[in-house]
Image: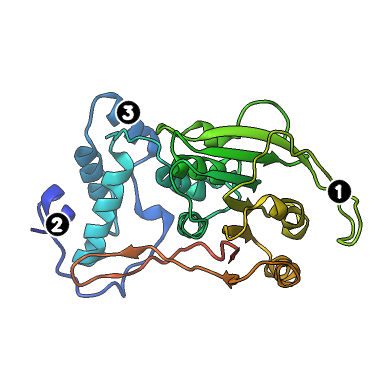
């Protein structure tokens, strides 16, 4: 059966048919934050806090039963202190990074990260090369997919300093692939000159190439790294700029690349409840574009 939060916590629901008389004003709630903090210090549970909020709300009686139910659910979620511990898998870390307002994960959405891993055809025990500026988010996901017997060559951009792995790559709990950090200095000004320094010491020919950056030009990175890719092996490039990927496409046409496709994914969180299933009112915009071949 469906849990009716308002009826369970308050013991009653509204008979108001619509919210036409409801005015969303800050003065409707009389309970102060200091009083809520005092209640919690004395051991009050979330249900008790919500009851007090309802009693002190001058607009409660003007809400419909649906509005009351949503209000109680939201407040119980806010004032509850239940903690669930979960292993930091790549998928969970990607969701945390995406909703982190600091943008530390380069705004890489979990759905496009999953598509990139799929198109890179990563298998356990294989070898991959990664260039990314997502604070280790893409690197960690690739290393997790390859497993303990795989190998990842991480080409670190000029802005990377230190010997530790990027932040998100250090958070995963599962066995991950061996990661080798290789300095990468893209000095390429034109594609028709040898103005490129690339330290490929101890780098084998790789079986998957993954590039994810919104900071550097994917064209220069791809031009430097694609010769490391074994024949017939896949590459995946993520960028916020479609124009940059078009330049990569032009280069790929003039090389031995084939079956390359640009794409953009789009997703939205959906509230799923009986008789009130609809998209959420707030959603993230574009998360860049993917080119694979």
The extreme left residue here reads: 1
Which of the two discs, 1 and 2, sits closer to the camera?
Answer: 1
Residue shown at 40%/44% (left/top)? 92
Residue shown at 92%/57% (left/top)? 193
Residue 22, percent from left and from top: 32, 68
Which of the two discs, 2 and 3, sits closer to the camera?
Answer: 2
Mark sitting earlier along the chain (2/3): 2
Residue placed under numbered mark 2 in the picture: 4
Name the side, left or right, on which 191 lies relative to 167: right
Return the residue nearer the eye: 180 or 149: 149
Q: CA distance from mark 2 to mark 3?
A: 28 Å
Which numbered tag is attached to residue 38? 3
| Residue 95 in the image: above or below residue 59 | above
Mark sitting earlier along the chain (1/2): 2
| Residue 149 in the image: above or below residue 281 | above
Q: CA distance from mark 1 to mark 2?
A: 64 Å
Residue placed under numbered mark 1 in the picture: 196
Mark sitting earlier along the chain (3/1): 3
> Colour scheme of this structure image?
rainbow
Name the side, left or right, on which 5 lies relative to 193: left
């Amino acid at each position: 059966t469906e849990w009716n939060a308002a009826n369970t916590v308050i013991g009653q629901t509204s008979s108001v048919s619509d919210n036409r008389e409801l005015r969303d004003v800050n003065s409707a709630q009389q309970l102060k934050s200091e009083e809520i903090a005092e209640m919690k210090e004395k051991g009050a549970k979330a249900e008790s806090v919500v009851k007090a909020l309802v009693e002190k709300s001058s607009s409660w009686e003007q809400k419909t039963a649906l509005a009351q139910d949503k209000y109680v659910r939201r407040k119980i979620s806010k004032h509850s202190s239940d903690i669930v511990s979960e292993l930091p898998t790549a998928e969970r870390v990607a969701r945390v990074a995406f909703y982190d307002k600091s943008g530390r994960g380069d705004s890489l959405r979990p759905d496009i990260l999953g598509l990139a891993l799929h198109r890179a055809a990563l298998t356990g025990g294989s070898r991959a090369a990664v260039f990314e500026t997502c604070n280790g988010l893409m690197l960690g996901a690739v290393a997790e997919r390859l497993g303990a017997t795989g190998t990842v060559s991480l080409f670190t951009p000029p802005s990377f300093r230190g010997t530790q792995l990027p932040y998100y790559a250090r958070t995963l709990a599962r066995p991950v692939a061996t990661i080798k950090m290789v300095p990468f200095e893209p000095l390429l000004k034109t594609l028709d000159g040898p103005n490129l320094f690339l330290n490929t010491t101890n780098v084998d020919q790789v079986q998957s190439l993954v590039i994810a950056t919104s900071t550097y030009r994917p064209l220069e990175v791809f031009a430097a790294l694609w010769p490391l890719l074994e024949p017939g092996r896949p590459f995946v490039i993520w960028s916020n700029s479609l124009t940059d990927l078009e330049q990569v496409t032009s280069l790929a046409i003039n090389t031995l690349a084939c079956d390359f496709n640009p794409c953009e994914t789009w997703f939205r969180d959906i509230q799923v409840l009986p008789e009130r299933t609809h998209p959420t009112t707030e959603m993230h915009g574009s998360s860049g574009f993917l080119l694979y071949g």
